[in-house]
Image (cartoon, helix red, strand yellow):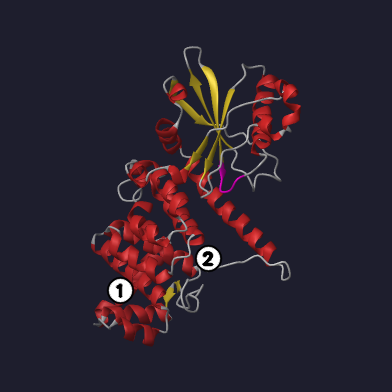
Amino acid sequence: MSLKKSKSDGTSENVENAAQKMHQIYDKLFKLVFEHEPSVNLFVRKFGDPDIVNQLDFNTLQLDSTSYLSKKLEAYFSDMVWKAAWGDERIAVAFLFEHKSAPERYVAVQLLGYIHSILDRDVRAKRPLTLVLPSIVNHGKRHWKPKHLVQLYPKKTESLHRFVPNFEIPCFRVDAIEDQTILDLPDDTVLKALLLVLKHGKDENAIQQFFPHFFSFYENHPHLHHFLEPFVLYMSELTEIKTEIVHDLIETTLSPKTKDGVMTTYAQFIQKGILQGKTEGKIEGKIEGKIEGKIEGKIEMLWKLWRKGFAMELMIELSDLPEMTLKLWITRFETLQKCRLEKKTADETAKIVQLTGQQVSDWWAFFEKMEKIR
Protein backbone atom coordinates (compact mmCIF):
# COMPACT_ATOMS: atom_id res chain seq x y z
CA MET A 1 0.00 0.00 0.00
CA SER A 2 1.38 3.37 -1.01
CA LEU A 3 -0.40 6.56 -0.04
CA LYS A 4 0.86 9.93 -1.29
CA LYS A 5 -0.22 13.31 -0.04
CA SER A 6 -2.54 15.31 -2.25
CA LYS A 7 -4.16 18.66 -1.69
CA SER A 8 -6.93 18.07 -4.17
CA ASP A 9 -8.29 14.59 -3.57
CA GLY A 10 -8.25 14.38 0.21
CA THR A 11 -5.56 11.69 0.23
CA SER A 12 -3.58 13.69 2.77
CA GLU A 13 -6.32 12.96 5.28
CA ASN A 14 -6.18 9.28 4.31
CA VAL A 15 -2.45 9.24 4.96
CA GLU A 16 -2.96 10.79 8.39
CA ASN A 17 -5.76 8.37 9.26
CA ALA A 18 -3.70 5.40 8.07
CA ALA A 19 -0.72 6.56 10.15
CA GLN A 20 -2.93 7.00 13.21
CA LYS A 21 -4.45 3.54 12.75
CA MET A 22 -0.99 2.02 12.36
CA HIS A 23 0.23 3.70 15.55
CA GLN A 24 -2.80 2.38 17.44
CA ILE A 25 -2.03 -1.17 16.28
CA TYR A 26 1.58 -0.81 17.43
CA ASP A 27 0.31 0.68 20.68
CA LYS A 28 -1.98 -2.29 21.35
CA LEU A 29 0.91 -4.69 20.89
CA PHE A 30 3.15 -2.53 23.09
CA LYS A 31 0.54 -2.45 25.87
CA LEU A 32 -0.03 -6.20 25.59
CA VAL A 33 3.66 -6.91 26.26
CA PHE A 34 4.22 -4.12 28.79
CA GLU A 35 1.38 -5.46 30.92
CA HIS A 36 3.43 -8.66 31.25
CA GLU A 37 5.60 -8.45 34.39
CA PRO A 38 8.53 -10.61 33.20
CA SER A 39 8.84 -8.48 30.05
CA VAL A 40 8.89 -5.21 31.99
CA ASN A 41 11.26 -6.70 34.55
CA LEU A 42 13.67 -7.70 31.79
CA PHE A 43 13.36 -4.37 29.97
CA VAL A 44 14.20 -2.35 33.10
CA ARG A 45 17.13 -4.61 34.00
CA LYS A 46 18.52 -4.58 30.47
CA PHE A 47 17.95 -0.98 29.39
CA GLY A 48 17.32 0.96 32.61
CA ASP A 49 19.59 3.51 34.27
CA PRO A 50 22.03 1.66 36.61
CA ASP A 51 21.37 4.25 39.36
CA ILE A 52 17.76 3.10 39.31
CA VAL A 53 18.23 -0.60 38.66
CA ASN A 54 20.92 -1.25 41.29
CA GLN A 55 18.66 -0.30 44.21
CA LEU A 56 15.31 -1.42 42.82
CA ASP A 57 13.45 -4.22 44.58
CA PHE A 58 12.21 -6.20 41.61
CA ASN A 59 10.17 -8.43 43.92
CA THR A 60 7.84 -5.49 44.51
CA LEU A 61 7.36 -4.63 40.83
CA GLN A 62 3.68 -4.51 40.01
CA LEU A 63 1.40 -2.93 37.43
CA ASP A 64 -0.56 0.12 38.55
CA SER A 65 -4.04 -0.65 37.25
CA THR A 66 -5.18 2.94 37.71
CA SER A 67 -5.73 4.80 34.44
CA TYR A 68 -4.39 8.35 34.52
CA LEU A 69 -6.00 9.23 31.21
CA SER A 70 -9.44 10.46 30.30
CA LYS A 71 -11.57 8.05 28.23
CA LYS A 72 -11.12 10.36 25.26
CA LEU A 73 -7.34 9.96 25.33
CA GLU A 74 -7.11 6.24 26.15
CA ALA A 75 -7.21 5.30 22.45
CA TYR A 76 -4.18 7.44 21.67
CA PHE A 77 -1.72 6.89 24.53
CA SER A 78 -0.24 3.86 26.25
CA ASP A 79 -0.60 4.93 29.89
CA MET A 80 1.60 2.13 31.29
CA VAL A 81 2.66 2.65 34.92
CA TRP A 82 4.61 0.12 37.00
CA LYS A 83 5.55 0.67 40.63
CA ALA A 84 8.29 -0.79 42.82
CA ALA A 85 10.16 -0.03 46.03
CA TRP A 86 13.57 1.63 45.69
CA GLY A 87 16.46 2.10 48.16
CA ASP A 88 16.71 1.50 51.88
CA GLU A 89 13.82 3.85 52.63
CA ARG A 90 11.54 1.86 50.28
CA ILE A 91 10.59 4.90 48.23
CA ALA A 92 7.81 4.13 45.76
CA VAL A 93 9.10 4.49 42.22
CA ALA A 94 6.72 4.57 39.25
CA PHE A 95 7.93 3.68 35.77
CA LEU A 96 5.79 5.55 33.29
CA PHE A 97 6.18 4.00 29.83
CA GLU A 98 4.86 5.85 26.80
CA HIS A 99 5.18 4.41 23.30
CA LYS A 100 5.83 6.70 20.34
CA SER A 101 6.32 6.05 16.64
CA ALA A 102 7.03 9.65 15.60
CA PRO A 103 8.38 12.83 17.22
CA GLU A 104 5.92 14.81 19.34
CA ARG A 105 6.79 18.37 20.29
CA TYR A 106 4.68 18.57 23.46
CA VAL A 107 5.30 15.12 24.92
CA ALA A 108 6.71 16.77 28.09
CA VAL A 109 3.33 18.40 28.68
CA GLN A 110 1.61 15.05 28.29
CA LEU A 111 4.02 13.40 30.73
CA LEU A 112 3.61 16.27 33.20
CA GLY A 113 -0.11 15.52 33.20
CA TYR A 114 0.62 11.90 34.10
CA ILE A 115 3.00 12.92 36.87
CA HIS A 116 0.48 15.35 38.33
CA SER A 117 -2.26 12.70 38.32
CA ILE A 118 -0.06 10.17 40.13
CA LEU A 119 1.11 12.66 42.75
CA ASP A 120 -2.40 14.04 43.21
CA ARG A 121 -3.63 10.54 44.07
CA ASP A 122 -0.83 10.21 46.62
CA VAL A 123 -1.82 13.48 48.29
CA ARG A 124 -5.51 12.56 48.44
CA ALA A 125 -4.63 9.11 49.81
CA LYS A 126 -2.34 10.74 52.44
CA ARG A 127 0.64 8.57 51.49
CA PRO A 128 4.25 9.46 50.64
CA LEU A 129 4.76 10.88 47.19
CA THR A 130 5.75 8.51 44.42
CA LEU A 131 8.93 9.23 42.47
CA VAL A 132 7.72 9.15 38.86
CA LEU A 133 10.25 8.20 36.17
CA PRO A 134 8.85 8.88 32.70
CA SER A 135 10.31 7.05 29.71
CA ILE A 136 9.64 7.07 25.99
CA VAL A 137 9.96 3.89 23.93
CA ASN A 138 10.37 5.14 20.38
CA HIS A 139 10.38 2.80 17.38
CA GLY A 140 10.31 5.50 14.71
CA LYS A 141 13.19 5.74 12.25
CA ARG A 142 13.79 9.45 12.87
CA HIS A 143 16.35 10.30 15.54
CA TRP A 144 14.40 12.15 18.18
CA LYS A 145 15.24 13.56 21.57
CA PRO A 146 12.12 14.72 23.46
CA LYS A 147 12.23 18.38 24.47
CA HIS A 148 12.25 19.14 28.18
CA LEU A 149 9.40 21.31 29.34
CA VAL A 150 11.65 24.33 29.75
CA GLN A 151 12.82 24.00 26.14
CA LEU A 152 9.29 24.63 24.90
CA TYR A 153 9.40 28.24 26.10
CA PRO A 154 11.06 31.09 24.12
CA LYS A 155 14.71 31.59 24.90
CA LYS A 156 14.06 35.23 25.77
CA THR A 157 12.15 34.01 28.86
CA GLU A 158 15.26 32.24 30.15
CA SER A 159 15.44 34.36 33.28
CA LEU A 160 12.07 32.90 34.33
CA HIS A 161 12.84 29.25 33.51
CA ARG A 162 13.65 28.52 37.15
CA PHE A 163 9.90 28.55 37.75
CA VAL A 164 9.21 25.84 35.15
CA PRO A 165 8.95 22.18 36.31
CA ASN A 166 11.78 20.23 34.76
CA PHE A 167 12.49 16.51 34.48
CA GLU A 168 14.48 14.19 32.28
CA ILE A 169 12.75 12.14 29.60
CA PRO A 170 14.84 9.08 28.69
CA CYS A 171 14.08 7.97 25.14
CA PHE A 172 14.76 4.34 24.28
CA ARG A 173 15.26 4.14 20.52
CA VAL A 174 14.35 0.64 19.41
CA ASP A 175 16.17 1.06 16.07
CA ALA A 176 19.39 1.81 17.98
CA ILE A 177 19.32 -1.56 19.76
CA GLU A 178 21.60 -4.07 18.03
CA ASP A 179 19.79 -7.04 16.49
CA GLN A 180 22.02 -9.46 18.36
CA THR A 181 21.17 -7.77 21.66
CA ILE A 182 17.50 -8.41 20.94
CA LEU A 183 18.09 -11.99 19.78
CA ASP A 184 20.05 -12.73 22.98
CA LEU A 185 16.99 -11.92 25.12
CA PRO A 186 15.27 -14.98 26.62
CA ASP A 187 12.16 -16.33 24.94
CA ASP A 188 9.98 -16.49 28.05
CA THR A 189 9.05 -12.80 28.21
CA VAL A 190 7.83 -11.98 24.65
CA LEU A 191 9.97 -8.83 24.88
CA LYS A 192 12.20 -10.21 22.13
CA ALA A 193 9.23 -10.61 19.79
CA LEU A 194 7.94 -7.09 20.54
CA LEU A 195 11.28 -5.38 19.90
CA LEU A 196 11.71 -7.25 16.62
CA VAL A 197 8.24 -6.22 15.48
CA LEU A 198 8.83 -2.60 16.47
CA LYS A 199 12.23 -2.49 14.79
CA HIS A 200 11.61 -4.56 11.64
CA GLY A 201 7.84 -4.67 11.16
CA LYS A 202 7.99 -2.81 7.83
CA ASP A 203 11.13 -4.45 6.46
CA GLU A 204 10.25 -7.52 4.39
CA ASN A 205 13.83 -8.79 4.20
CA ALA A 206 14.29 -8.49 7.96
CA ILE A 207 10.96 -10.20 8.61
CA GLN A 208 12.10 -13.17 6.55
CA GLN A 209 15.47 -13.18 8.30
CA PHE A 210 14.09 -13.08 11.84
CA PHE A 211 10.75 -14.83 11.30
CA PRO A 212 11.34 -17.76 13.71
CA HIS A 213 12.20 -15.31 16.50
CA PHE A 214 8.85 -13.53 16.18
CA PHE A 215 7.24 -16.66 17.62
CA SER A 216 10.06 -18.20 19.66
CA PHE A 217 8.09 -17.55 22.87
CA TYR A 218 5.54 -20.18 21.81
CA GLU A 219 7.70 -23.29 21.57
CA ASN A 220 8.44 -24.25 25.19
CA HIS A 221 6.39 -21.79 27.22
CA PRO A 222 2.72 -22.85 27.49
CA HIS A 223 2.00 -19.93 29.83
CA LEU A 224 2.73 -17.57 26.91
CA HIS A 225 0.48 -19.26 24.35
CA HIS A 226 -2.20 -16.59 24.79
CA PHE A 227 0.22 -14.14 23.12
CA LEU A 228 0.21 -16.08 19.85
CA GLU A 229 -3.17 -14.92 18.59
CA PRO A 230 -2.57 -11.17 19.05
CA PHE A 231 0.96 -11.43 17.63
CA VAL A 232 -0.31 -13.19 14.50
CA LEU A 233 -3.09 -10.63 14.11
CA TYR A 234 -1.01 -7.52 14.75
CA MET A 235 1.88 -8.69 12.61
CA SER A 236 -0.56 -9.36 9.76
CA GLU A 237 -1.96 -5.85 10.09
CA LEU A 238 1.41 -4.16 10.43
CA THR A 239 3.31 -5.85 7.65
CA GLU A 240 2.72 -5.79 3.90
CA ILE A 241 4.49 -9.07 3.19
CA LYS A 242 2.57 -11.28 0.78
CA THR A 243 0.51 -14.10 2.21
CA GLU A 244 2.20 -16.79 0.13
CA ILE A 245 5.59 -15.67 1.47
CA VAL A 246 4.27 -15.80 5.03
CA HIS A 247 3.02 -19.32 4.40
CA ASP A 248 6.40 -20.44 3.07
CA LEU A 249 8.11 -18.92 6.11
CA ILE A 250 5.74 -20.75 8.43
CA GLU A 251 6.38 -24.01 6.60
CA THR A 252 10.16 -23.75 6.32
CA THR A 253 11.40 -21.83 9.38
CA LEU A 254 9.20 -22.87 12.31
CA SER A 255 9.33 -26.04 14.37
CA PRO A 256 6.39 -28.44 13.91
CA LYS A 257 4.78 -27.40 17.17
CA THR A 258 5.05 -23.66 16.51
CA LYS A 259 4.05 -24.14 12.87
CA ASP A 260 0.83 -25.86 13.92
CA GLY A 261 -0.01 -23.07 16.34
CA VAL A 262 0.69 -20.23 13.92
CA MET A 263 -0.97 -21.93 10.96
CA THR A 264 -4.18 -22.78 12.78
CA THR A 265 -4.35 -19.25 14.16
CA TYR A 266 -4.03 -17.90 10.61
CA ALA A 267 -6.78 -20.28 9.53
CA GLN A 268 -9.05 -19.07 12.31
CA PHE A 269 -8.64 -15.42 11.34
CA ILE A 270 -9.20 -16.15 7.65
CA GLN A 271 -12.37 -18.12 8.44
CA LYS A 272 -13.74 -15.24 10.47
CA GLY A 273 -12.92 -12.74 7.73
CA ILE A 274 -10.51 -10.88 10.00
CA LEU A 275 -7.57 -11.28 7.63
CA GLN A 276 -7.51 -10.73 3.89
CA GLY A 277 -4.86 -12.42 1.76
CA LYS A 278 -2.23 -10.00 0.39
CA THR A 279 -2.08 -11.75 -2.97
CA GLU A 280 -3.98 -11.75 -6.25
CA GLY A 281 -7.66 -11.56 -5.42
CA LYS A 282 -8.71 -12.00 -1.79
CA ILE A 283 -8.67 -14.98 0.49
CA GLU A 284 -12.25 -15.70 1.37
CA GLY A 285 -13.36 -14.41 4.72
CA LYS A 286 -15.75 -17.30 5.12
CA ILE A 287 -15.26 -20.91 4.17
CA GLU A 288 -18.36 -22.50 2.72
CA GLY A 289 -17.77 -25.86 4.37
CA LYS A 290 -19.29 -25.73 7.85
CA ILE A 291 -18.49 -28.02 10.74
CA GLU A 292 -21.68 -27.90 12.76
CA GLY A 293 -22.88 -31.42 13.49
CA LYS A 294 -22.88 -32.63 9.89
CA ILE A 295 -19.63 -31.95 8.04
CA GLU A 296 -20.15 -30.86 4.46
CA GLY A 297 -19.06 -28.51 1.68
CA LYS A 298 -15.70 -27.68 0.24
CA ILE A 299 -13.62 -28.52 3.30
CA GLU A 300 -14.99 -32.07 3.31
CA MET A 301 -14.10 -32.37 -0.38
CA LEU A 302 -10.65 -31.02 0.35
CA TRP A 303 -10.10 -33.66 3.04
CA LYS A 304 -11.02 -36.44 0.62
CA LEU A 305 -8.67 -35.09 -2.05
CA TRP A 306 -5.87 -34.73 0.47
CA ARG A 307 -6.30 -38.29 1.78
CA LYS A 308 -6.14 -39.63 -1.77
CA GLY A 309 -2.84 -37.87 -2.36
CA PHE A 310 -3.95 -35.50 -5.11
CA ALA A 311 -1.40 -32.94 -6.29
CA MET A 312 -1.74 -29.42 -4.91
CA GLU A 313 -2.64 -27.89 -8.29
CA LEU A 314 -5.42 -30.43 -8.80
CA MET A 315 -6.80 -29.95 -5.29
CA ILE A 316 -6.98 -26.19 -5.89
CA GLU A 317 -8.82 -26.74 -9.17
CA LEU A 318 -11.27 -29.34 -7.85
CA SER A 319 -12.02 -27.75 -4.48
CA ASP A 320 -12.13 -24.19 -5.83
CA LEU A 321 -10.39 -22.96 -2.68
CA PRO A 322 -7.58 -20.37 -2.57
CA GLU A 323 -4.16 -21.98 -2.20
CA MET A 324 -3.50 -20.35 1.18
CA THR A 325 -6.82 -21.52 2.59
CA LEU A 326 -6.19 -24.99 1.22
CA LYS A 327 -2.73 -25.22 2.81
CA LEU A 328 -4.01 -23.95 6.15
CA TRP A 329 -6.69 -26.63 6.27
CA ILE A 330 -4.32 -29.39 5.27
CA THR A 331 -2.12 -28.41 8.23
CA ARG A 332 -5.18 -28.54 10.44
CA PHE A 333 -6.10 -32.01 9.10
CA GLU A 334 -2.60 -33.26 9.90
CA THR A 335 -2.84 -31.92 13.45
CA LEU A 336 -6.32 -33.35 14.00
CA GLN A 337 -5.18 -36.76 12.82
CA LYS A 338 -2.01 -36.66 14.92
CA CYS A 339 -3.93 -35.72 18.09
CA ARG A 340 -6.47 -38.45 17.38
CA LEU A 341 -3.76 -41.11 17.07
CA GLU A 342 -2.08 -39.82 20.24
CA LYS A 343 -5.40 -40.31 22.11
CA LYS A 344 -5.66 -36.65 23.09
CA THR A 345 -9.07 -35.50 24.28
CA ALA A 346 -11.29 -33.35 22.09
CA ASP A 347 -10.84 -30.40 24.44
CA GLU A 348 -7.04 -30.73 24.42
CA THR A 349 -7.04 -30.90 20.64
CA ALA A 350 -9.44 -27.97 20.35
CA LYS A 351 -6.90 -25.68 22.00
CA ILE A 352 -4.23 -26.72 19.51
CA VAL A 353 -6.28 -26.44 16.30
CA GLN A 354 -8.41 -23.49 17.49
CA LEU A 355 -11.77 -25.21 17.08
CA THR A 356 -14.42 -26.07 19.63
CA GLY A 357 -14.41 -29.46 21.32
CA GLN A 358 -17.60 -30.36 19.47
CA GLN A 359 -16.07 -29.47 16.12
CA VAL A 360 -13.05 -31.67 16.89
CA SER A 361 -15.38 -34.56 17.80
CA ASP A 362 -17.30 -34.06 14.56
CA TRP A 363 -14.11 -34.16 12.53
CA TRP A 364 -12.93 -37.32 14.26
CA ALA A 365 -16.29 -38.95 13.65
CA PHE A 366 -15.95 -38.00 10.00
CA PHE A 367 -12.45 -39.49 9.86
CA GLU A 368 -13.71 -42.79 11.29
CA LYS A 369 -16.62 -42.88 8.88
CA MET A 370 -14.35 -42.33 5.87
CA GLU A 371 -11.91 -44.98 7.08
CA LYS A 372 -14.69 -47.57 7.30
CA ILE A 373 -15.84 -46.72 3.78
CA ARG A 374 -12.30 -47.21 2.49
Pair 2/1: label in front: 2
Question: Could you say where residue 339 lies in the image, as x and y percent from the top left?
Answer: 28, 61
Image height check: is 291 above or below 29?
below
- Measure how far apart labels 2 and 1 are at the Cα level: 29 Å
Relative to 131, 41 lies left or right: left
Residue 302 belongs to magenta span: no
Relative to 104, 287 lies left or right: left
Residue in the picture at 42% in, 69% down: 243
Residue in the picture at 26% in, 82% down: 308
Mark 2 = which residue? 274
Q: Quadrant of the C terminus?
A: bottom left
Q: Label the magenta part by its dominant secondary structure.
A: loop
Q: Which mark is residue 367?
A: 1
Question: Could you say where residue 105 lies in the image, as x and y percent from the top left?
Answer: 66, 42
Residue 101 belongs to magenta span: yes
The magenta region covers: 99-103
Residue in the picture at 45% in, 65% down: 268
- Circle 1 residues within 10 Å: few <14, some 14–19, many ≥20: some
Image height check: is 49 above or below 372?
above
Query: Depth check: 223 or 137 in front?
Result: 137
Question: Could you say where residue 169 lies in the image, as x and y percent from the top left?
Answer: 57, 32
Q: Which mark is residue 321?
A: none
Q: Three-letter amino acid code at disc 2?
A: Ile
Question: Is residue 35 in view from this perspective?
Answer: no
Image quadrant where residue 305 sits: bottom left
Q: Three-letter amino acid code at disc 1?
A: Phe
- Circle 2 residues within 10 Å: few <14, some 14–19, many ≥20: few
Query: Depth check: 59 or 192 in front?
Result: 192
Residue in the picture at 44% in, 43% down: 176
Relative to 98, 346 lies left or right: left
